[in-house]
Image (tube, grey):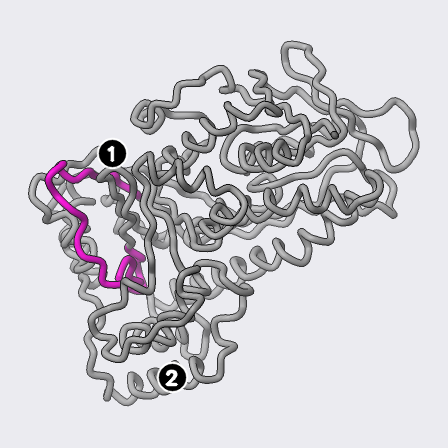
Amino acid sequence: MAKFVVIGGSISGLLASISLSRQGHEVKIVDPTASNTDLDLEKRFSSRQKGMAQRHHSHAFLAKLRNILRSNFPDILDALLDAGAFEMPFMEFLPETILQKNSEPDDVDLVGIGARRTTFETVILGIAQKESGIDFIAGEILGLVASKNTCNPTKIRGVRTKNGDEILGDLVIDCSGRNSERNKWLENLELRGETIEESPCPIQYLTRFYKLPSSALFPEPDGRFAGDFGYIKVGIFPADNGFFSTTVGLNDRDKQLKGLKNPEAFDRAMLAFEHTGKWLRIKDVKPITNVEVMTKLKNRRRRPVTLNQDGSLVGLIALGDSLMHTNPLYGRGCTISSMQAQELPKIIDRSNDETQLIENWNAYVGKEIFPYYDMAVFQDAQDFMTGENGGTPPKGSLSYVIKEGVVPASYVDAGVYRAFIKAFNLIGGPFDLLSDPEVLATINKTISKRESNTWQLPDPFGPAHDELVKLIENSL
């Protein structure tokens, strides 16, 4: 049995801790809010926590995450469903325009989870509280505790809290999120900091939550949960217990649409889009939150000093957003955290010592996790080009292929729809979408038809940019 110190008690920290505890290890979770043991879903949803703006935005709990829960944490999946979350079998949501429907054996793996972020987190917290191998310690981290010898690599032995307590363990796991102060802690020990790579996300997000009356049901799904209209992305996110949210992503330099922060303007805008309007038109739907805003976003990953260099470390790893986070548009954060939480005990078991553990962890991260950062940066660069081109993707770009080929083809072809759903839900590699020859042929044929004006299916309805600007102005 080993002893682990986990910094942070959100989804990544909780999943990692449960995963380690169930392998017989002792885990201490250090978090400023650890004394809050209340598991009331609505109290948690209405509360606010500094540095956790994403809690009140839409979340996509992808099929990859659901499959990890089903295989490794079935009690968590059951508890989520008991708490009001629900499974979303994407291959049962085919658009009506797909006339030739077929099924494949692995369609059972293409199932997401509908839930609010706070519900997901609260359910996992309740399970972690019952684990005999997990202790919660309320405290704010002041720094790391290192071995006193001067050998390389330096051994991290634990953490020090602001009230002076030292919490020691065989491995410190930083799950403190995107605002981790890890480099500051290392610098305070006169150790080299990690290399931080950053890339701006040229987008801002606005989200509002709503709730259906108890007598109402969600609209019949038709495979259209999101639409990309060039100048704006608009999505609908069914959640637990009758809640749902709508989120828009728009160019952060588009000042003409800043009025969407006004709740009335936001609601009127959502009514103007076909796929969100049908949700807001349900009788007696109530808005629950104001319009939540996330802006000034970045893709970021942190590379530790490699073990053959001066300043390297053992006894410390990062997991979740404190290791890497990307544009929330892609909905990958919680899923990638679950991938790491699932893998960590396996890496510990096959590592003979703490040096090999760090080597194995870094190798896993480089192969399985960091490619999603590269993909996000590439996709954001494509979106930036689209924004610079007046909202129209440049011909030949990946954005052009997605908008003019993948999306319209997914409305008429089950194979393309399935490939698109797999790619979005991280079933397969980050660049697998265009690897199937049949799928690629259908996409290219669709692009040709649209370029020659022989494509007959209309695009999802939504206002043009100038029309939306006028709608906003008339709402203020």
Q: In which quarter of the image is residue 168?
A: top right
Q: Which residue is drawn at 58% across and 23% down?
A: 132
Mark 2 Cα shell of 10 Å, populated few (<14), some (14-19), many (≥20): some
What is the distance, in whole Å, between disc 1 and disc 2 at their CAs?
42 Å
Between residue 102 and residue 247, name the one nearer to us. 102
Mark 1 Cα shell of 10 Å, populated few (<14), some (14-19), many (≥20): some
* Residue type (three-letter) at the residue carrying disc 1: Asn
Q: In which quarter of the image is residue 368?
A: bottom right
SS for dot 2: helix
Task: Judge whether residue 220 is colored magenta.
Answer: yes
Between residue 390 and residue 72, name the one nearer to us. 72
In the rendered structure, the answer to whether residue 217 lies left or right of residue 385 reads left
Q: Position of residue 283 (x, y in %)?
A: 7, 43
Residues rendered magenta in the picture: 207-234
Is the Cβ of the residue at disc 1 closer than 8 Å to that at disc 2? Answer: no
Q: Which of marks 1 and 2 is in front?
A: 2
Q: Position of residue 150 (x, y in %)?
A: 92, 29
Name the residue tied to disc 1: 290
Residue 442 marker:
2
Q: Name the quarter where the C terminus is drawn.
A: top left
The secondary structure that most of the magenta stretch takes on is: loop
Q: Which residue is drawn at 36% across and 25% down?
A: 44
Q: Position of residue 390 (x, y in %)?
A: 33, 66
**Residue 454 appearing in the image:** yes
